[in-house]
Image (cartoon, rainbow, N blue to C red):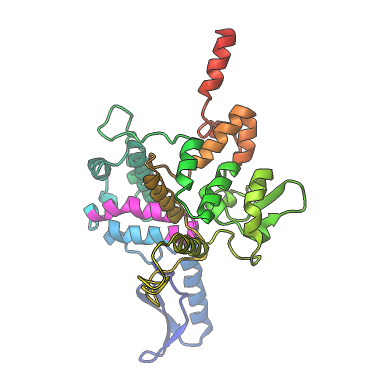
Amino acid sequence: MRKPSEPTYRFHKSSGQAVTWIQGRYYYLGRFGSAESHQEYHKLLAKFHANPGSFGVDKSRLSIAEGAVRFLRHCKEYYKESPEFRQYARALQPVIELFSDCHVNDFGVVEFKTVRDHWVKNGCARSYCNKQAKRVVAFFKWLVSENLVKVTVHQELKTVPPLVAKRCSAPERPKVRPVDDATIEATIKHLPKVLADMVRIHRLLGCRPSELLCIKPCMVDTTSEVWTIKLEKHKNAWRGHDRVLVIGPKAKQLLRPYLDRAEDAYCFSPAEAMEQRLADREAARTTALSCGNRRGSNRKANPKKKPGTFYTVIGYTKAIHGAARKAGVPIWGANRLRHAAATAIREEENLEAASAILGHRSMSMTENYAERSLRLAIETAKKHG
């Protein structure tokens, strides 16, 4: 998956010609150093940059595996740091495993349904199967745009309807619900202080987990009564949308100690959490220092895996899962804190306020996060029912 290097203008010693190498093939350009050879070189280079995915491809021999490699190279360049590249790689994995040698024009409705049944048989949720199936269709749409496959292949795949709830054997994924405050408090008792504060701040801000983990002191504007954090990297940055986190009094009190560090350092550090965990364990030690191991005496000098400078979403979620198990409460994920914040704001204020805090462009999206309050419905029924 390495990025192809820029083709160079070179001298072919045995023939005296200029030559260039583009995607596994030599192109002879004429007498080395001549104006015609340079003109031919720049013409080939222009064609290559215009269609890097299909340049020099023998369409009569293009297999699914070769097309997938070209498409994933395109995804890596297009999506950059977005996790969408990994999702496309997962979607194409069964396609390559089952039909790697199949010609791209021979992939039809039967093969497409076979791939979808592969996910169903492996117990994947219906919504997941439908999303991954859409990515497979997008793969063939890209091949059409690169003139590598007949347009009829993409049109045929689009005729396959998605899996419908209760009309297929794929299980339903449970809806993400807000986590209640009692469960949160029980969980954070088993987390280091850094992670416990992260969960509390996350619950107050209602942001995405990735937005919380990227906060640095240089991003926090403390000049006004209500602090603000303008994020440069976020989910909808590629659409040109702005995302600003608003820090109220409660969140300010929790976040303030984590601003006392280098301006470009991450506020929440796994290394700091590890140090706190070891310090707490040492403080709770009951064995005399003359007996047993001292702190750090039984650890490797150069371990393969060391605490990083910032938390990943996976690491943050795993820490919450482990603490929930210790607390004896149902395991919950970090994104449920966003749902909890949205539901609380909707209940105390209104849906528009919840939409503003969550950073949504439409309130219809906020409805997926902010649950309707049963308590409010009961109170209303008492008055009007």
Which image quadrant: the C terminus? top right
Residue 86, percent from left and from top: 40, 55
Q: Is residue 190 visible?
A: yes
Residue sitting nearer the eye, 302 or 53 = 302
- The residue under the point 27% across, 55% down is 96
Give the magenta range. Answer: 74-97
Q: Is residue 279 above or below residue 302?
A: above
Residue for point 51% across, 49% down: 209
Q: Residue lying furthest top in this view?
A: 385
Q: Is residue 81 magenta?
A: yes
User: Residue 227 location in percent, x, y?
Assistant: 71, 49
Q: Nearer the viewer, residue 271 or 82?
A: 271
**Dominant secondary structure, magenta:** helix
In the rendered image, residue 225, in percent from the top left (x then y), is placed at 76, 46
Q: Residue at x 47, y 75 (%)?
A: 6
Vertical order, 8 against 351 (above or below): below
Question: Looking at the image, which residue is at 58% across and 55% down?
Answer: 233
Q: Is residue 294 left or right of residue 116?
A: right
> Which image quarter holds the N terminus?
bottom left
Q: Is residue 298 left or right of residue 8?
A: left
Q: Would residue 105 be counted in the magenta stretch? A: no
Percent x, y for residue 154?
A: 36, 44
